[in-house]
Image: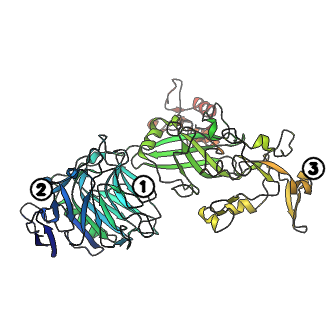
């Protein structure tokens, strides 16, 4: 037997096991209307509200079997997985507004799922009212996150997006990579109003999210999002779990409460967003707690070398063929408030350009793949842009608390021909120069950092057996690096001392020795036929192993040492710092703000800038590492 009820002006059919009182959009007593206010900057696709009229329960239980949209009788989410009791209805929750209580403590994968009627959302705004609770492991991390919803799925027309918490932080997974925002553990068990905007491609934003109108600090993602489509399953909305690229429901289930979820087609403007946030917020029984004060960003540094030694205790496996002349430094600024990392990687020799950077950890993958990377073809980040790279919360905290467990490995483009102690170019010998990281022979090519080349061959990139040809302008577009062709086509590579050995003869249309090369007996035949050892030629690691581990160089992550002699704060003690000491000579006018007052006879600042401070600067000369 079926009953027909009027819900927000829509006819809704329910079964005899559903609650049957009519849904009235006018406020009842102390309760707020289940129907949201009208908006003009978007279209309401689905209004799921936990009230008796929209729910079907299993006989003689509070377990939810169906949840129907209040605004569209054709949209219904059907329960799947087990046990059914993991999703139940509490009519007294949220002060009598009603909530779904989701208690999937054991990860049994109970969910609600259904089509949204063939929707393709290039832009979307989604709100929900409820809270996360600690999950199966007693924290909000819950192994790999708790999903409130996932919409769409990867495919020809769909690109999944979701709303979840992972490692205590708000997170969005867009079908290809996660974007991690603010720590939200302060909202444990506190009913809150959550809003996420998804921007369709192309975009410089990708998404933005708030909790109780507080920015959740998601990093930008230029790929944008689109979800849904006409093919079956592509527009499915799955609550309290995750759906993979084939549309299969998986675990990582939600633990918490939810009262209402609103899906809008389009990006709601500020006025409409505020109206919906205020509407949902008016249902809260108490004000949610605010976030704690922001933590200070933390700096970590790496002294980059091409060889291992006292200054670089990183495992040999990461760069066994490094260049003894390689040196540089990396500065990583880790922001624990939004799980982001800004970085600066500088090599002292400008013949080399860093194209990829990786973080390795023996703890996670002994002698294996990198834990995360940025820059270049295989990264989820822009080409070494240096700002706002998102790092998993656990890894970021380890880099702060235990930096010695992390090794930075860099890969470069560029390099130089090797010369011996007599200044001669070193001919290539495969028995010496071409072995893998495990000591096995490797067959030519770019598989380690000592790569053979005919002397006149100055191409930086070779053929990629899977994807095309390096040097092809179309293919090369995957590297947004305008300097690549200048480096490749400007002048032949020099040797380790910076000397050019060949030049191009336009009349003969051939490579000939320079005066310098001819002085060593170099001939045209040598140029045409002889392979020479080349250090760090388009170094991307061994074989096609996604950039590692055989890097051009790197080093162990360290906490920077205190460097009071770096008065100008540029990371180096130089003549500029000496000049600042001389310029501030004498008594400090403001003793508490006198950076040139480094030390006194007592070993501490004494309010006077004098010869003791000058000697301290000179003694600390060089990089602050």
580 sits to left or right of 124: right
Task: Work out whether mark 3 precedes mark 2 in sequence or the reverse, and give the earlier one.
Answer: 2
- Residue at 79% of width from left, 49% of height from top? 498
Q: Residue furthest left?
A: 29
Nearer the observer: mark 3 or 1; the answer is 1
Q: Which residue lies most toward the top here? A: 602
Residue 62 pos. (x, y %): 14, 54
Residue nearer the viewer, 346 or 544 = 544
Which quadrant of the view contains residue 262? bottom left
Is disc 3 surrounded by few (<14), some (14 to 19) or many (20+) residues within 10 Å? Answer: few
Image location of residue 409, percent across then percent down: 60, 44
State the SS at label 2: loop
Circle 3: element type: loop
**Horizontal arrangement in the rendering, residue 337 relative to residue 100 (left or right):** right
Residue picked out by circle 2: 91
Discs 3, 2 touching: Cβ within 8 Å: no
Q: Secondary structure at mark 1?
A: strand
Query: What label sits on residue 179 in the rendered view?
Result: 1
**Inter-mark Cα distance, 2 to 1:** 35 Å
Percent position of residue 193, x then y: 25, 57
């Amino acid at each position: 037997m079926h009953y027909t009820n009027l819900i927000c002006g829509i006819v809704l059919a329910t079964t005899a096991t559903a609650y049957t009182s009519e849904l009235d959009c006018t406020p009842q007593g102390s309760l707020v209307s289940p129907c949201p206010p009208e908006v003009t900057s978007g279209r309401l696709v689905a209004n799921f509200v936990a009230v008796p009229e929209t729910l079907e329960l299993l006989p003689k239980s509070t377990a939810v079997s169906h949840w129907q949209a209040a605004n569209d009788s054709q949209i219904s989410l059907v329960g799947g997985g087990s046990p059914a009791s993991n999703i139940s209805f509490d009519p007294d929750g949220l002060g009598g507004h009603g909530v779904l209580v989701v208690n999937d403590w054991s990860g049994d994968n109970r969910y609600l799922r259904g089509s949204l009627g063939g929707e393709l959302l290039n832009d979307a705004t989604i709100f929900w009212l409820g809270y996360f609770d600690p999950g199966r492991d007693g924290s909000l991390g819950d192994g790999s996150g708790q999903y409130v919803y996932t919409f769409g799925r990867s495919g020809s027309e769909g690109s999944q997006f979701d709303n979840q918490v992972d490692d205590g932080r708000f997170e969005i997974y867009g079908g290809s990579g996660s974007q991690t925002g603010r720590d939200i553990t302060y909202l444990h068990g506190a009913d809150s109003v959550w809003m996420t905007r998804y921007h369709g491609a192309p975009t410089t934003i990708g998404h933005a999210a708030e909790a109780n109108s507080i920015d959740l600090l998601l990093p930008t993602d230029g790929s944008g999002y689109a979800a849904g489509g006409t093919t079956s399953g592509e527009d499915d909305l799955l609550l309290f779990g995750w759906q993979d690229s084939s549309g299969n429901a998986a675990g990582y289930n939600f633990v918490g409460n939810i009262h209402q979820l609103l899906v809008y087609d389009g990006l709601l403007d500020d006025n409409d967003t505020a109206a919906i946030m205020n509407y949902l917020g008016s249902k809260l029984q108490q004000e949610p707690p605010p976030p704690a004060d922001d933590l200070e960003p933390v700096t970590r540094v790496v002294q980059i070398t091409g060889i291992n030694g006292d200054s670089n205790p990183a495992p040999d496996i990461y760069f066994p063929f490094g260049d003894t002349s390689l040196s540089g430094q990396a500065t990583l600024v880790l922001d624990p408030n939004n799980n982001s990392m800004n970085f600066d990687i500088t090599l002292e020799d400008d013949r080399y350009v860093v194209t990829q950077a990786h973080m390795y950890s023996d703890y996670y993958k002994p002698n294996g793949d990198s834990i995360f990377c940025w820059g270049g073809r295989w990264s989820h980040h822009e080409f070494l842009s240096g700002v706002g790279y998102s790092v998993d919360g656990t890894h970021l905290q380890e880099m702060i608390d235990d930096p010695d467990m992390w090794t930075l490995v860099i890969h470069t483009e560029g390099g130089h021909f090797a010369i011996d102690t007599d200044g001669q170019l070193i001919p290539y010998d495969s028995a010496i120069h071409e072995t893998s990281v495990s000591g096995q022979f490797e067959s030519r090519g770019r598989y380690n950092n000592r790569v053979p080349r005919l002397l006149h061959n100055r191409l930086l990139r070779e053929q990629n057996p899977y994807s095309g040809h390096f040097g092809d302008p179309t293919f090369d577009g995957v590297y947004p690096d305008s300097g690549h062709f200048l480096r490749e086509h400007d002048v032949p590579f020099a040797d380790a001392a910076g000397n050019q050995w060949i030049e191009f003869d336009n009349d003969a249309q051939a490579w000939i020795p320079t005066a310098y090369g001819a002085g060593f007996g170099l001939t045209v035949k040598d140029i045409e036929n002889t392979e020479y050892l080349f250090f760090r030629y388009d170094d991307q690691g061994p074989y096609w192993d996604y950039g590692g581990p055989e890097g051009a160089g790197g080093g162990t992550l360290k906490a920077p040492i205190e460097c009071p002699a770096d008065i100008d704060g540029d990371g180096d003690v130089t003549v500029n710092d000496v000049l600042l000491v001389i310029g501030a000579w004498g008594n400090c006018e403001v003793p508490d703000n006198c950076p040139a007052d480094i030390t006194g006879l007592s070993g501490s600042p004494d309010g006077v800038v004098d010869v003791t401070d000058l000697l301290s600067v000179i003694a600390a000369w060089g990089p602050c590492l």
